Image (cartoon, rainbow, N blue to C red):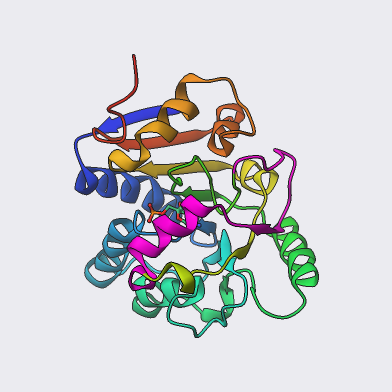
Amino acid sequence: MELIIVKNYEEASDLAFEHMIEVVKSNPKANLGLATGSTPIGLYDRMVKDHQTNGTSYKEIKTFNLDEYFGLDPQHEQSYYRFMYEHLFKDIDINLDNTHVPSGVGDIQENCNQYNALLKENPIDIQLLGIGGNGHIGFNEPGTAFDSVTHYIELKQRTREDNARLFFNGHLEEVPTHAITMGISNIMAAKKVLLIACGENKADAIVKMVEEEPSVDCPASALKNHPNCVCIVDEAAASKLSK
Ligand code: GLP
């Protein structure tokens, strides 16, 4: 795992953009694993700006998102599909048929099976990740097995509170209690993993991920076993590291 400490969110987004665009430019048919949450917004803004000013094309790119809330229709204003559409898809030349977000409605086990099959057919070239305050990646909460594949999961209270603060206008009761998420082994199968962590709220999770032995208590710690994982961490998120 390569750990790169940068000053702030802007620098983290700039550097993440460089990693992402290198993959897109070297392979115009790349499969991108994408993430939601507040962290990747700066990166998506840069991808949109680059597309508009430099014409980088996403016509043959396919995208695969990590997760979706259970029970939210893609058109729901807090769904992760909607997030991706508003922050990225609508402003680049991607074919929407090539964008994939797990479905949180309908037969959830069937949705998991279909997503696993899709990921098998489409190996991911770069998987973008944020990290939860409790060390979750995607919606793989602490306790999730490292060999997990796409599954249905109950969200921890802290995850729902964090996501209520940033989204859902602060209304905890509106945050779904469950989600569908790629499993840790799906994430580990990506050729490259790019994790971004910014802000003090992530400092404890970063210490666990970096300084402790891989353990299901901190799902992100699985990444230590990935052969090509770059973690971009700002000074605030790195502030509790001992070395
Ligand atoms: C959610 C998402 C994760 C994301 C996390 C952190 O739980 N499922 O993929 O990494 O939030 O969000 P933020 O970037 O807003 O801190």
- Which residue shows up at 34% across the image and 77% down it? 91
Residue 72 location, quadrant: bottom right
Side of 133 relative to 222 (left or right): left
The image shows a total of numbered marks equal to: 0
Quadrant where the image shows the C terminus: top left
- Which residue shows up at 58% across the image and 80% down it? 97
- Which residue shows up at 40% across the image and 51% down it? 20
Residue 100 location, quadrant: bottom right
Residue 81 to residue 158: above or below: below
Which residue is the extreme one toward the bottom? Answer: 75
220 vs 31, nearest the viewer: 220
Residue 131 to residue 180: above or below: above
Side of 66 relative to 236 (left or right): right
- Which residue shows up at 35% across the image and 37% down it? 232
Residue 43 to residue 9: above or below: below
Q: Position of residue 158 (x, y in %)?
A: 47, 50
20 vs 237, nearest the viewer: 237
Side of 204 relative to 45 (left or right): right
Q: Position of residue 6 (x, y in %)?
A: 24, 34
Q: Is residue 1 something that shows in the picture?
A: no
- Quick check: which quadrant has ligand 1? bottom left
Q: Is residue 16 something that shows in the picture?
A: yes
> Which span is picked out in magenta?
142-170
165 vs 125, nearest the viewer: 165
Residue 15 location, quadrant: top left
Q: Position of residue 183 (x, y in %)?
A: 67, 50
Which residue is the extreme one toward the top? Answer: 243
Reply yes or no: does residue 155 show up in magenta. yes
Side of 241 relative to 24 (left or right): left
Q: Position of residue 182 (x, y in %)?
A: 65, 55
Reply yes or no: does residue 209 show up in magenta. no
